[in-house]
Amino acid sequence: MLNMQPSLLSVDSIALSFGGLLAVDRVSFAVESGQIFSIIGPNGAGKTTIFNCISGFYAPNTGNISFNGHAIEGRSSHKIAKYGLVRTFQNIRLFKEMTVLENLLVAQHNIANRNLISGIIKLPQYRKAESEALDKAEYWLYQLGLTAFANREANSLAYGQQRTLEIARCMVTEPTMLLLDEPAAGLNPKETEELDELIVQLRDMYGITVLLIEHDMKLVMNISDRILVLDQGRVIANDLPSEVQSDPAVISAYLGEEE
Ligand SMILES: Nc1ncnc2c1ncn2[C@@H]1O[C@H](COP(=O)(O)OP(=O)(O)OP(=O)(O)O)[C@@H](O)[C@H]1O
Ligand SMILES: [Mg+2]
């Protein structure tokens, strides 16, 4: 029988230009539920711009994006997060002066759209939601090894821990799919290996589908089910890691760069 299950995420011929620069040029790809799908390519290839289109930070000029049955191109990032698609940023964006725990509570408020009035007068259902939010925050702090830092300012954490906190901030919203923009940037080899394990765990234990932008080739080749390669806004390959590694076009556009 034919597999008629639609892809969890499908990106269909999206394009976006900034002035005269065509940053994303008719890019299409599909991510299946449960995959770890990576996007690689040289600096300026358009990777983050594609993330911005998928997560509602930019609207593509043309093309369609569907996630879990919803047409999401041009929708707000808030709406898209409510559908279960959340992201981290290439440059860490935490509330730096809030505590680690507060960062995780705020993330849940943003998603829940909780009624302000019921918050002020502390209705029982509000208190229940608050205590669930706290439980969820504590759960993810524990899972990601951040419990000891719960009451520290986000600012005061080591860089690698801030990256982990960004992932925790996504996870408390109980997403279906995570978009990670260079999560290993600035991490040492040991931290990168731990991140590697964490991403696989999120998929295997929690069924999270992962779309990953990453320059660390070892990480990408180790954990990806499939890899999309971009060069100057265009797709030059979409294949298994083993195939991508030996694709001459990819080697000349990207992998060769590192030698
Ligand atoms: N808001 C913007 N305004 C103007 N140009 C932009 C904007 N965002 C991105 N660009 C340009 O679009 C192109 C693609 O940028 P993008 O950030 O998507 O690349 P990238 O593949 O994520 O690169 P990197 O690996 O360096 O993060 C680049 O030439 C960049 O300068
Ligand atoms: Mg980028």
Image (cartoon, rainbow, N blue to C red):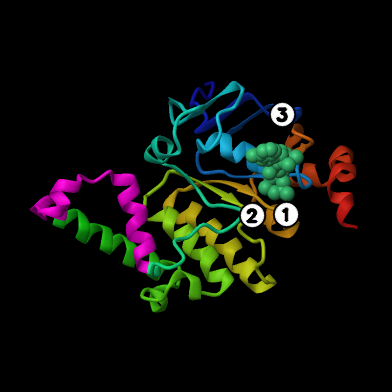
**Residue plotted at (64% across, 66% down):** 192
Crowd tier of the residue under label 1, counting other residues whose Cα lies within 10 Å: few below 14, some 14–19, many 20 or above = many
Q: Amino acid at mark 2?
A: Glu
Q: Quadrant of the C terminus?
A: bottom right
Residue 19 badge:
3
Q: Which is more toward the observer, 139 or 65? A: 65
Q: Which mark is residue 215?
A: 1
Q: Is residue 67 magenta?
A: no
Name the residue type under label 1: His
**Element at label 1:** loop
> Looking at the image, which residue is at 44% across and 53% down?
170
Q: Is residue 83 above or below residue 174?
A: above
The spot of residue 222 in percent (x, y) is 68, 56
Q: Is residue 184 left or right of residue 255?
A: left
Marks 1 and 3 in Cβ contact (< 8 Å): no
Query: In the image, is residue 123 part of the stretch drawn in magenta?
Result: yes
Assess disc 3: are there few (<14), some (14-19) or many (≥20) residues with their C-alpha within 10 Å of its C-alpha: few
**Magenta segment boundaries in residue numbering:** 101-126
Q: What x and y, as percent, mark residue 212? A: 61, 48
Task: Note whether ligand 2 is within 8 Å of mark 2.
Answer: yes
